[in-house]
Image (spheres, coloured by chain):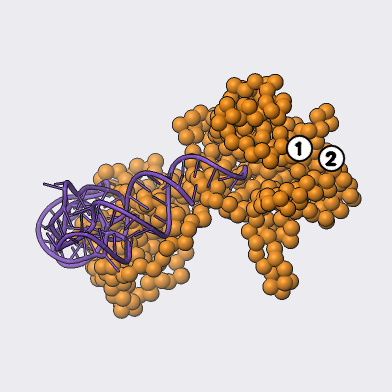
Chain colours: A orange, B purple
Amino acid sequence: MAQQDNQIIQSRKTKLEAIREQGVNPYPNDFKPENTLAWIRENFDAIEEAEALAKVSVKVAGRLMLLRNFGKLTFAQMRDATGALQIAAARDEIGADLYRNLFRKIEVGDILGVTGHLFRTKKGELTIRVETFQLLTKAVRPLPEKFHGLEDREMRYRQRYVDLIVNPEVRALFQDRSTIIRLIRTYMEELGFLEVETPMMHPIPGGAVARPFITHHNALGTDLYLRIAPELYLKRLIVGGFDKVFEINRNFRNEGLSVRHNPEFTMMEFYQAYADYRDLMRLTENLLFHVAQQVKGAGQFEWNGQKLDFTPPWERLTLEESLVKYADADALQLTTEAGLEAFAKEREVYLDPKWDAGKKLLELFEALVEKQLIQPTFIIDYPVSVSPLARSSDDRPEITERFELFIGGWEIANAFSELNDPEDQAARFRAQVDAKDAGDLEAMHFDDDYICALEHGMPPTGGEGIGIDRLVMLLTDSTAIRDVLLFPQLKPRG
RNA sequence: GGGGCGUUAGCUCAGUCGGUAGAGCAGCAGACUUUUAAUCUGCGGGUCGUAGGUUCGACUCCUACACGCCUCACCA
């Protein structure tokens, strides 16, 4: 972000030049720290004896976050990737010339390498007594104010590097995000799932109901779509004989931004041959309970002022049951299209007359129930018309063996027993193409090669997608997806 | 896209009834060898988001636009 040099930047650049004029490189790369600040604190914070501390020699590097100068003595707080520790430099110990001409030119925000021994101040704080020091990187822009830090949301997102420097809780959140993903990956691998990577650029967008981003390949002379889901590729791998696969990666959907939506977001999709949606419900409960226990220390934890309980088993309701339980619907009324319309009118929910009964039922659920599903809840048995890739129920052909998982009022996961009948799948694709021709921008394309794959025989399979960003939001007590993405999408600066 | 709120110094924020802007931190000069948001003295620092309008005069009132936040709609 271009900014006019202000007084402060000018002052810092003047110091930079003064350092250069002394023959000192303000950006050297020959200093190798040997100790982390957290290691020093862990090993010596409990030691009180001055003689014992004085024997400890350390070599550290980090950014100066606070500077307190007393003329002939300077205290500074140094921060590295692991933690923070105080250093103290005395004029009479490092030499008057160095102290005046170089150390005093160092400012908050600069990165410093230091060697020295440990001691404890009069107030008892563990501190490094500086014996030698080296300026490692001069910062010519000032850091935000030391007490309030950087609070402006826009600046925090646009200049995340500054946010990370001055707001330690942001750093901790992204470490948690990494931990969550690692726990999921390890859990899946231990269940025997193979991690795979499938294309991000698709000639035919598929696997979800969404509008894609379009891009162009010059050499091939063809348009490509950023993937909206990896689903159809992962199921090709099931056809190919990998019985358990998963992928944790980005999806891209050309939709609006909101507190819960970013155009690129991270999903885990996984497919297991010879499993059905009931098996996946059990897997999902156990997986998320495990992750919560590891990250939060318990299966129950606070999120957004509410207590969430991830302890299995979780409630399972059909769409109709959820409307009865959470919206006081009459069960019988929901069984007919006329009844659905009457119920919608009563609750002032708009239903497009062009929609079929299944779509109307789903709309009623989304309008009246979804936000109330705070505790983990599986909603099951979705209509066929809104589930073009899911296997129909053998008992009730109008519904599919599908569930969506809701937590905190948000959809967290979507799963079903996969449709592996190529003729049925082809018919479903044709229905989608008809909807697209009728103007539905989100309807699916017909994927000939996917039908061809199914014609080779895909074993009965259960498949699921879990929204990683939303899961991270729950586990980090966040309410905006931007807060769990290092670089969330924002409008370009005007 | 609709509605509401916001945008003032590098950062965090005040700014009354319309009379050309203040504080703390940060910066500069100085004092200080044990501070913990160090303290003390002095000094600088502003396109008041942008562009128009009303007015003798606009940070302040009006309009449009930009960006952000919240919310609704669409979606995961």
Q: Is residue A15 above or below residue A44?
A: below
Res. A60 in view? no
Instruction: Inspect the image, locate mark 1, and give the three-letter code of the amino acid beneath it.
Output: Val
Indicate the amino acid at tag 2: Pro
Residue A23, position as x, y percentages in the image: 34, 78
Q: Give the vertical position of A476 relative to A223 (above or below).
A: above
Residue A349, given in percent of the width and then of the height, sits at 58, 33
Q: CA distance from mark 1 to mark 2?
A: 18 Å
Q: Disc 1 vs disc 2: which is toward the camera?
A: 1
Whole-percent x and y of residue A209? 68, 47
Q: Chain of mark 1?
A: A
Residue drawn where x is 83% and y is 56% of the image: A449
- Chain containing mark 2: A
Residue occupying image coordinates x 49% and y 30%: A306
Up the image or down, A425 lies above or below A398; here it is: below
Dot label at residue A384: 1
Q: Are marks 1 and 2 in contact (CB under 8 Å)?
A: no
Which label is found at residue A460?
2
Q: Could you say which disc has been placed on residue A235 in the image?
A: none
Is residue A411 found left or right of A25 in the rendered image?
Answer: right
